[in-house]
Image (cartoon, rainbow, N blue to C red):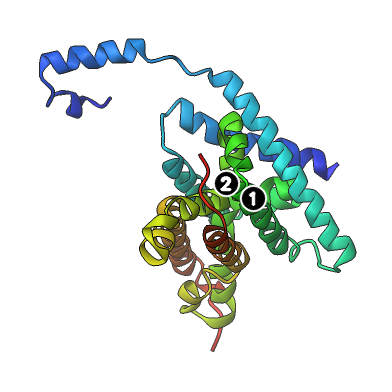
């Protein structure tokens, strides 16, 4: 905990916090990382397999094949989420199932399903982006800033009329 | 061979995410946001494309590739359409992922009852 936050607490609260910190079960970081590594790796291998299928059977080139691959993975993930399977995998795998795009799709579909009872607009429409929203917002702003930096430091790339 | 590299790099990026969870005590939203920005910055420096070439889906399936695609779209339109491309191009490449996720999440919410 940062010091500036600590100062506002009374001594009793500080004592409590230290006690709570001692009692907090330490997380099995190594085992968690191993699981994340395995599951994340397997999801990427599945993705690679789907990509190879698009390249060999549908005539996409390597670069173009990654978009449909991501779409297929997202559909698979949402189907698994609908049956409650993806969340079971997530409990075991931690970041291994959260970090691939399948986790992005899972965060959207599980929030949408969970909040269905609050209505289609405020429930499904709004709550769908609980986790995906920040990801899209920060990704978009970062991409815009990076494009601006490219324009400033490398004006030659700006094409058009 | 590309399958092995995809496994290794994809797994490694997930381990970075797990370390954010466990060691830095970040929430899933913070972790995913950081990874997306990381992917965007790497692509801005021109370092993400070599990763995709080297590890295929190992680099294009983790969420970092979402940041990479956002920057890619912006720079691509910047080259073809001039300065306005920095705004018009951002979602050019990521359309597949975002559209699929929105459409099928909506359908799932309409068709499926929540579990547990």
Residue B19 at what x, y percent from top left? 51, 29
A151 relative to A42 in the view: left or right: left
Q: Does residue B47 show up? A: no
- Up the image or down, B108 lies above or below A35; here it is below
Q: Residue at x 53, y 69 (%)?
A: B91
Q: Residue at x 46, y 73 (%)?
A: B87
- Up the image or down, B106 lies above or below A97; here it is below
Which mark identifies residue A77? 1
State the quadrant of the N terminus of chain B. Answer: top right
| Mark 2 / mark 1, whichever is N-terminal | 1
Residue A47 at what x, y percent from top left? 74, 50
Give me the chain letter of mark 2.
Answer: A
B58 relative to B39 in the view: left or right: right
- Real-space Cα distance between discs 2 and 1? 8 Å
Which mark identifies residue A10? none
Q: Which residue is mark 2?
A: A103
**Neighbourhood count class around disc 1 (C-alpha, 10 Å): few under 14, some 14–19, many 20 upward:** many
- The quadrant in which residue A34 appears is top right
SS category of the residue bearing label 1: helix
Q: Nearer the viewer, mark 2 or mark 1?
A: 1
SS category of the residue bearing label 2: helix
Residue A61 at what x, y percent from top left? 81, 66
- Foreground pick, A139 / B96: B96
Q: Does residue A3 show up? A: yes
Q: Residue at x 55, y 85 (%)?
A: A160
- Foreground pick, B95 / B4: B95
**Neighbourhood count class around disc 2 (C-alpha, 10 Å): few under 14, some 14–19, many 20 upward:** many
Q: Residue at x 44, y 60 (%)?
A: A124
């Amino acid at each position: 905990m940062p010091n500036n936050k600590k100062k506002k607490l009374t001594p009793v609260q500080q004592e409590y916090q230290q006690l709570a910190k001692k009692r907090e079960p330490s997380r099995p970081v190594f085992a968690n990382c191993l699981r994340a590594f395995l599951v994340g790796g397997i999801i990427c291998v599945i993705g690679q397999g789907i990509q190879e299928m698009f390249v060999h059977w549908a005539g996409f080139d390597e670069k173009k094949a990654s978009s449909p691959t991501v779409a297929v993975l997202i559909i698979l993930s949402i189907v698994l989420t609908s049956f409650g399977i993806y969340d079971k995998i997530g409990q075991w795998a931690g970041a291994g199932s959260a970090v691939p795009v399948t986790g992005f799709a899972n965060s959207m579909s599980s929030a949408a399903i969970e909040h269905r009872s609050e209505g289609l607009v405020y429930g499904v429409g709004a709550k769908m982006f609980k986790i995906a929203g920040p990801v899209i917002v920060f990704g978009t702003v970062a991409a815009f800033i990076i494009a601006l930096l490219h324009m400033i430091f490398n004006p030659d790339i700006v094409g058009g009329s | 061979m590309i399958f092995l590299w995809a496994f290794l790099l994809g797994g490694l990026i997930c381990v970075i995410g797990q370390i954010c969870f466990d060691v830095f005590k970040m929430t899933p939203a913070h972790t995913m946001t950081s990874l997306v920005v990381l992917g965007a910055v790497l692509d801005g420096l021109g370092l993400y494309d070599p990763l995709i070439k080297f590890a295929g889906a190992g680099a294009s399936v983790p969420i970092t590739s979402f940041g990479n695609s956002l920057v890619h779209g912006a720079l691509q339109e910047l080259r073809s359409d001039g300065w306005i491309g920095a705004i018009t191009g951002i979602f050019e490449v990521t359309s597949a992922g975002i559209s699929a996720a929105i459409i099928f999440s909506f359908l799932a919410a309409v068709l499926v009852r929540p579990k547990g």
